[in-house]
Image (spheres, coloured by chain):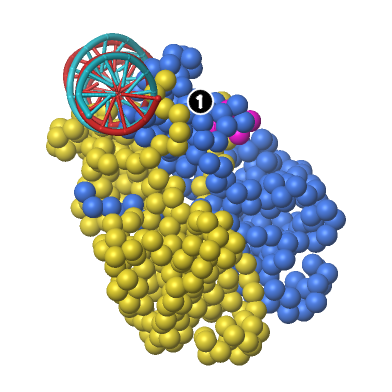
Chain colours: A blue, B yellow, C red, D cyan
Amino acid sequence: MPSRGRPVKARTRPRSVSVRNELTDRIDRGVLAAGTRLPSEPALATELGVSRATLREALRTLEGEGLVRRMWGSGTYVAHGRRVATSLDVNFGVTEAIRAAGMEAGTVQGRYWFEPASAAEAGQLNLEPGQDVLVVERVRTADGKPVVLSRDILPARFLADHAELADQMLRRSMYEVLERDLGIAIHHGVATFRPVRADVTVARQLEIPRGELLLAIWQVDYDENDVAIVSSHEYHLADAFDFTVHRRGPGRRVQ
Amino acid sequence: MPSRGRPVKARTRPRSVSVRNELTDRIDRGVLAAGTRLPSEPALATELGVSRATLREALRTLEGEGLVRRMWGSGTYVAHGRRVATSLDVNFGVTEAIRAAGMEAGTVQGRYWFEPASAAEAGQLNLEPGQDVLVVERVRTADGKPVVLSRDILPARFLADHAELADQMLRRSMYEVLERDLGIAIHHGVATFRPVRADVTVARQLEIPRGELLLAIWQVDYDENDVAIVSSHEYHLADAFDFTVHRRGPGRRVQ
DNA sequence: ACGGGGAAAGTTGTCTGACAAATACTACGA
DNA sequence: TCGTAGTATTTGTCAGACAACTTTCCCCGT
């Protein structure tokens, strides 16, 4: 009975994860086109240099992500591309969404500052109230036109010795900076959204009339150990994007 | 090389699916509380009467759904319940969402009719233009107050000999009727949404002023074989719900 | 020539047993 | 008291085999 407290951290990468990434890449690059059948499990396992059990672990994951479909006795097929570019449930960050829509992502009016966390923020990020947080506020543009106002909040201690990275966050994707420069990978997040009208402050920053339609998104992102990393508030121009969600069924079929 | 055309249908249920359902039930019923560690794989496999390989298939699925977390060398833990009740990505249907919010779901102004499919509908549902579809239009209420206007469209052939089921759909959840009475289980769907203002028609039906904030949702639902079943248009009152999405990370970590 | 039935091949699902790798607990020593 | 090495536990991976299911294709009867 080795364990008691909360588990801590995973370090090395199971081989099945590498296999999963390799297959995801092949699908994304079109090497494996939608609808085609994958090689049989024994053949694919040999090709990838892993056992069939390991390959099946990877395939089961891909099936859960909706990238492939497995048919007993028939084969494993690449699902018909249902990965909508701006899909809310798989895409993180505004930068990626804008790029995926084929537009050029930019930032204007970027600024940041440090301040003590409010009670609400402290609760979301699991901090003591009053501990310092970094606030990054940006207006994001698509092909030069303002489309999103975002305010990202993360505990200042993550930047302990790298205060200069706050500058980077104004220019690059925050998720990119977190992962490349700080080694923090966002694993999942919970987003809540609601239609709102632009108030006078938001309207001025996005250069739109007051009362314009927006989608407000509140979001908290976590790393793989379920530790809260970033809290975000975003206001998206309703006309700029179509938001898409891939919904999975209740999966509560009869046995 | 046995296969060529599109795969058709799976009939019998792999045992790993039954195992998954059993574990999901235990978690939902609280037999396995959040944060607790599951028995070891060999122990659990023995208890459930399957091999360890089959159990691992089920566990991998549950991990993909975010219900458990596996830690190499440590154990498998029940994830801390992040299944938000009104979550857009796991909950289907307005009825369930209203009930999950603790309110009483009702229907007023329900009506239905048959008509030839429009070109757009035919495309979504994979029909020939002009084939008949059933249109079910309802105003859904939460605790008596109108909150959602919905229009569901499905091919008339599904009701071939059960035209009386259209009546049922006015009263009960459409997903319930599909599954219980027609044996059609919705497996997944793709929803697109956007903030809109209520036009005069919608405003009258929902008993709200013109211009009120709504969230418009267009959705197509598929069965497990990727066959389009229902196309829905819904207008949700912005004040009535908070919409939540569980976002999964890009999972594109370095290898 | 055509259509139907059944055997055969191919593929995924499951089982068994074993070992490797990582983690958690424990006992020992400084 | 603290750190360290060792040991037990647990998940990850491997190999081979058979079962269940699907698809193909050939043979046979009409």
In front: B186, or B100? B186
Residue at the image position 23 percent from the left and 43 percent from the top:
B18
In the image, residue B214 above or below residue A186? below
The residue labelled by disc 1 is: A18
Question: Is residue A12 depicted above or below B26 in this figure?
Answer: above
The location of residue A133, given as percent across then percent down, is 64, 56
Secondary-structure class at tag 1: helix
Q: Quadrant of residue D22?
A: top left
Rendered location of residue A43, percent (x, y): 43, 16
Judging depth in this view, the residue of A246 and B45 nearest the camera is: A246
Q: Which residues are magenta?
A: A24-29
Q: Is residue A25 magenta?
A: yes
Amino acid type at mark 1: Ser
Write down the quadrant of residue B211 in the picture.
bottom right
For disc 1, the neighbor class at 10 Å (few under 14, some 14 to 19, many from 20) is some
User: Is A90 placed above or below B178 here?
Assistant: above
Labels in figure, total: 1
Q: What residue sits 52% from the left and 28% below the top?
A: A23
Tell me where residue A246 appears, x and y as whole percent. Answer: 51, 53
| Horizontal relation, residue B183 to residue A50: left or right | left
Query: Image quadrant for the N terminus of chain A?
Result: top left
Q: Is residue B230 magenta?
A: no
Q: Quadrant of residue A200?
A: bottom right
Residue B102 image position (x, y, % from top left): 35, 75
Q: Is residue B249 visible?
A: yes
Instruction: Give the residue displayed 36% in from the left and 34% down from the top.
Output: A71
